[in-house]
Amino acid sequence: MKRLYAAGLLAVLLVLAGCSGGPTTTTADGPDATTAVPTVPTTTTDPGTPDDPRNDSGLSGTHPAVSDGQLNATRLLRGHVEAFRPLASFTVQDSSVVRHAGNESLVVTEAERRRFNISAQRVLVERRLTLPNGTVRNQQVRYTNETLTCAVGATTECSSGGFNPSEALQATTVDTSLATVPAPRFVPNGTTTVNGTDAYRYTADQFRDSIPAPAQAPLGEDPTLRSATLFVSESGQILRYQAVYEGTIDGERYLTTATYGVTAVGETSVPSPLSD
């Protein structure tokens, strides 16, 4: 389930512009049995607004994954994935809100919720694109249990080969807003708490002089950063990431607000969307 990376954003916008009528749902060919498609929130649940004080936590002032005063994004992302290993369940929320940079009028919102229950060996990924008028133009649901992986829509198509612990861990970051974390020039900026969890804060107001290609792709051409903030737990988990940036795609300048957060740790259940 690919996100709105710059290479494909124009094509998505053209398709959306040409659509009319009511909401549409992406479906998969398969058995005649139909399944209700779960509703995906148009915006992600806010993982929490960090407290204002710059050092209001029980953490030391030494920030992890920092080299020469700057964040080592590769080390941070590796630690983020590893921090999920001991967790029984959690939810990853990811969204991209795309606007015209000139007047900041809304173009499209992409929201994705990934629910993981490792102990029950279940993963449910829900994604949709929404137009400014609230019309849903694309909705996708993917469900994995112990034995099956299913694309769920008006019809459902399942294949054998279900839950894989390694693939589940990788799914916490693949095709999410975290792809752009290596781009901002992050520096440590005190500590705080996020939903009661002590966290290290990193902030940035400009991109690095040299951006790795995978991080460059979602940004478009001639990207400029308005702001970016990271909140990282003592275990190395990224609790919340938000970046607001401009980029040019096929001559059009867009403003994107990308947000990623981890919620409901130890409290995430994964209901089956399959028919009984």
Image (cartoon, helix red, strand yellow):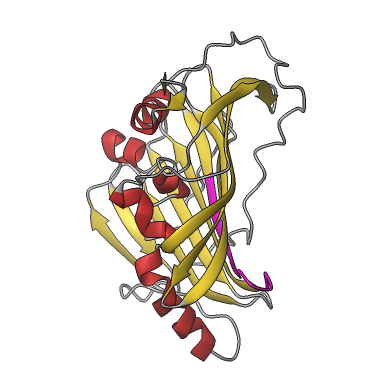
Q: Residue at x 67, y 69 (%)?
A: 104
From this viewpoint, is residue 273 visible? no
Question: x and y percent of residue 243 in the render?
Answer: 56, 48
**Residue 204 versus residue 17 in the image, above or below:** above
Which secondary structure type mostly characterizes the magenta part of the structure?
Answer: strand
**Residue 238 versus residue 21 in the image, above or below:** above
Left or right, 44 with reference to 167: right
Question: x and y percent of residue 150 in the render?
Answer: 34, 58
Picture quarter with the C terminus: bottom left
Residue 73 found in image quarter: top left
Number of marks drawn: 0
Residue 121 found in image quarter: top left
276 or 104, nearer to the observer: 104
Instruction: Based on the picture, tell me whether residue 102 belongs to the magenta stretch.
Output: yes
Q: Residue at x 33, y 39 (%)?
A: 170
Question: x and y percent of residue 110 in the render?
Answer: 54, 63
203 or 64, nearer to the observer: 203
Q: Residue furthest left?
A: 160
**Residue 172 versus residue 55 in the image, above or below:** below
Picture quarter with the N terminus: bottom left
Instruction: Based on the picture, tell me whether residue 124 belongs to the magenta stretch.
Output: no
Q: Residue at x 64, y 72 (%)?
A: 102
**Residue 146 versus residue 134 in the image, above or below:** above
Q: Residue furthest front?
A: 209
Question: x and y percent of residue 59 in the render?
Answer: 61, 11
198 or 63, nearer to the observer: 63
From this viewpoint, is residue 211 visible? yes
Residue 68 found in image quarter: top left
Q: Which residues are magenta?
A: 93-105
Left or right, 203 with reference to 276: right
